[in-house]
Amino acid sequence: MIDKNLEEIERHEDEICNHIRRQILGLSDQVRSKETWHKILAGADPEAIANALSRQLTHFNYQEVPRCKCRGKCSYSCT
């Protein structure tokens, strides 16, 4: 039973990490991403969520991108 729980936690953890990567790479738009998060988090163990977030935010070098100051004049959706 314990092994099955550990396997389930690891599966959820991997699923969360994969979706974080997909979202950062822009492979999932905001609407689909929100739907995916609802589905993932509804069934995930809190331990898996904590482990995945800790792992993703510790092992990757994320940088904050400054907000565009063009006020909608550039080709990016920055407004």
Image: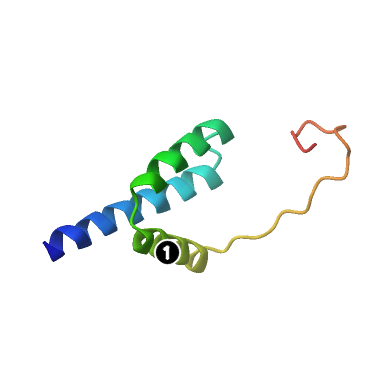
Residue type at numbered disc 1? Ala
Question: Horizontal placement of 54 versus 67: left or right?
Answer: left
Q: In what quadrant of the picture does the C terminus appear?
A: top right
Q: Which residue is mark 1?
A: 50
Total tally of numbered discs in the picture: 1
The residue sitting at the left extreme is: 1
Residue at 35% in and 60% down: 48
Please indicate whether residue 22 sits to the left or right of residue 66 in the image. left
Query: At numbered mark 1, what does the secondary structure look like: helix, strand or loop?
Result: helix
Q: Is 20 above or below relative to 31?
A: below
Question: In which quadrant of the rendered image does the N terminus lie?
Answer: bottom left
Specify few, some or many for label 1: CA neighbours under 10 Å numbering under 14, 14-19, or 20 or more: few
| Residue 11 percent across, percent down from the top left | 27, 52
Where 59 falls versus 69 (above or below)?
A: below
Report x, y in % for residue 50: 42, 64
Image point (44%, 38%), residue name? 36
- For image coordinates 46% across by 43% down, the residue present is 37
Residue drawn at point x = 28 percent, y = 58 percent: 9
Q: In which quadrant of the rendered view does residue 29 lie?
A: top right
Q: How is the image coloured?
A: rainbow
Quarter-of-image position of residue 31? top right
**For this rendering, which residue is in front, 51 or 61?**
51
Up/down of 41 relative to 77, above or below:
below
The foreground one among 43 and 68 is 43
Residue 38 horizontal/vertical position (percent): 45, 41
